[in-house]
Image (spheres, helix red, strand yellow):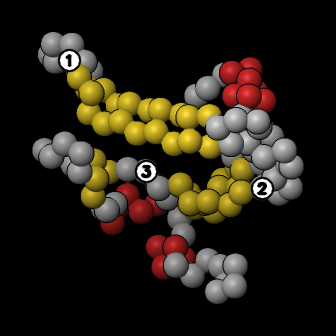
Amino acid sequence: MLPADAWAAIQAASVEADATLSVAGYDRRPGNHGAWRLSEGSVTFRTAREPVGDAIFYRDVPLMPVRTHQGIVRPLRPEALPLIEWRLRDITRPAPSVVMSNLPTCANCHSFSADG
């Protein structure tokens, strides 16, 4: 997690110009001689001058990597479905709140009205 002061500096600097966030994943398993890059990605964004004005509602789903195939992520096993949590995040606060859990997966497609 990024320290609050670093995120505040990024927000301030990205109001007038684009900011690019780059992330890389490395294999650091015991027995691996040195770390090697498994994945990488980046996104460019800009911070709006106006406040968001409300919380963000989202579904938090853990990734289920396939141990025998690098770079492959599979759907959740049925016994892992209770790990899905629905969260509400006020971006001015350091952490989200879990508002729903143990919800049937059919709610994934039937959570919102057709017009948003």
Amino acid bearing label 2: Ala
- State the residue in front, 106 or 44: 44
Q: Is residue 34 above or below residue 20?
A: above
Label 3 to label 1: alpha-carbon separation: 24 Å
The residue singled out by tag 3 in the image is 62
Q: Residue flagged by tag 3: what amino acid is it?
A: Pro
- Judged from the image, the secondary structure of the residue bearing numbered disc 3 is loop
The C terminus: image quadrant:
bottom right
Q: What residue is pinned by disc 1?
A: 30
Q: Is residue 95 left or right of residue 59?
A: right
The residue that label 2 is drawn on is 55
Sequence order check: which comes first, mark 3 or mark 1?
1
Question: Horizontal placement of 54 versus 32: left or right?
Answer: right
Question: Which residue type does callout 1 highlight?
Answer: Pro
Locate the N terminus by quadrant.
top right
Which residue corresponds to the image point at 71% horizontal and 57% vertical from the top-left?
56
